[in-house]
Amino acid sequence: LRVVMPSSPFDAKGLMAHALRCQDPVLFLEHRELMSIKGPVPEIDYEIPFGQARIVRPGTDVTVVAISLMVHRTLEAADQLAQRGVSVEVVDPRTVSPLDTETILKSVAKTGRLLVVDEAFGPCSVASEIAACVADQGFDDLDAPIKRLNGAFTPTPYAPSLETAVTPQTTNVVQAIQNLMAE
């Protein structure tokens, strides 16, 4: 089973093209808030192979692996923290099955710190799997404990104001990175 979670229009088109040619079953998860995001999408045909993460923003102080909509909130947080001298590397896995652990591990080896931002609640989440992978294969590269920022362990409410209260927001990402940098 292949699981795709794009964060941009460019990635959505390229990953969908690859999914249509894939012989395996593909679960293509698009966050509803991403439907209104605009971005460049070439008219030519192209594919993005599964299992190839993208370094959305290079950095040197902390690695943040962000999934789907959380990529955008993490980029906003990285902009704010850059003004305070914190260099955040943002990694977008694009697919969670297969997961590009090589890119994540290389980034963690460079920065020494890892925060995983995932809207799903923590137990049995993709964030948990990423954290376990880095703990197993990249433990010696860590300068601080691995941290996860997940949605609240509750059903997601329908009302937008309540949904905002239970999902990670930019301010939560900023705070989580600052806490990790203080470790």
Image (cartoon, grey):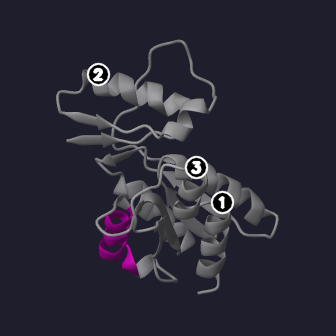
Secondary element type, mark 1: helix
Work out whether mark 3 precedes mark 2 in sequence or the reverse, and give the earlier one. 2
Q: Residue at x 28, y 37 (%)?
A: 27
When the figure is inspected, residue 180 is found, relative to residue 90, above or below; the finding is: below
Q: Residue at x 40, y 65 (%)?
A: 154
Q: Give the quadrant of residue 162.
A: bottom right
Residue type at mark 1 is Thr
Residue density around tag 1, few if under 14, some if 14–19, many if 20 or more, within 10 Å: some
Residue type at mark 2 is Leu
Q: Residue at x 17, y 27 (%)?
A: 23
Residue 53: x, y in percent? 44, 47
Secondary element type, mark 3: helix
The residue that disc 3 covers is: 160
Report how far apart the C-alphas of labels 1 and 2 lie in the structure: 34 Å
Residue 169: x, y in percent? 61, 60
- Asked if marks 3 and 1 touch (Cβ < 8 Å), the reply is no
Tell me if 68 is positioned left or right of 183 in this view.
left
Tell me if 112 is positioned left or right of 27 in this view.
right
Q: Residue at x 54, y 53 (%)?
A: 70
When the figure is inspected, residue 1 is found, relative to residue 157, above or below; the finding is: above
Which one is in front in this view, the residue at disc 3 or the one at disc 1?
3
Report how far apart the C-alphas of labels 3 and 2 lie in the structure: 33 Å
Query: Which residue occupies the foreground of this view, 5 or 145?
Result: 5
Residue 34: x, y in percent? 55, 37
Which one is in front in this view, the residue at disc 3 or the one at disc 2?
3
Q: How many marks are shown on the rendered structure?
A: 3
Is the N terminus in the top left, top right, bottom left or bottom right quadrant?
top left
The residue that disc 1 covers is: 170
Q: Main secondary structure of the magenta part?
A: helix
The residue that disc 2 covers is: 20
Residue type at mark 3 is Pro
Query: Which residue occupies the foreground of this view, 33 or 103?
Result: 33
